[in-house]
Image (spheres, rainbow, N blue to C red):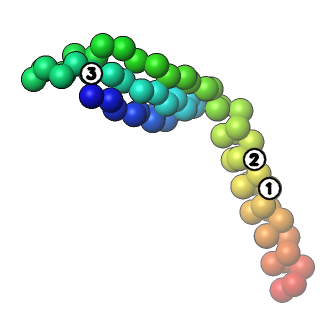
Amino acid sequence: MKMNVVFLTQTENSTVFGCGLYLFSKQTVLVALSRVGACTNITARKQTELEIRQLNEQVEERVQQRTA
């Protein structure tokens, strides 16, 4: 049996995205025979997304102030 997994782990200081494939035995009790996957630290990307959101909010506020 195969099972695809995708996960996102967040801590106070970092964010990690991962995906993989687990292969299980066909017995009644699931026993992982092997796993293959990769993880990527996306902390910098998440920080950049947050900064862009904040800048967009600031621009919106300025536009509202100027057009009021």
Mark on residue 24?
3
Q: Judge the density around disc 1: few (<14), some (14-19), many (≥20) Cα neighbours within 10 Å.
A: few
What's the residue type where badge 1 is placed?
Leu
Residue nearest the observer in this picture, 26 or 15: 26
Quadrant the N terminus occupies: top left
The answer to whether mark 1 and mark 2 are in CB contact below 8 A is yes
Residue sitting at x 33%, y 22%: 23
Residue nearest the observer in this picture, 1 or 14: 1
Residue nearest the observer in this picture, 12 or 3: 3
Q: Position of residue 2 (x, y in %)?
A: 32, 29
Distance between mark 3 and mark 2 Cα atoms: 42 Å
Left or right of residue 50, residue 15 in this image = left
Left or right of residue 12, residue 2 in this image = left
Instruction: Determine which residue is flagged by label 2.
Output: 51
Picture quarter containing residue 25?
Answer: top left
Residue 7 visible in the shown view? yes
Q: Secondary structure at mark 1?
A: helix
The answer to whether mark 3 and mark 2 are in CB contact below 8 A is no
Residue occupying the far bottom of the picture: 68
Q: Secondary structure at mark 3?
A: strand
Distance between mark 1 and mark 2 Cα atoms: 6 Å
Picture quarter containing residue 53?
Answer: bottom right
Instruction: Determine which residue is flagged by label 1.
Output: 55
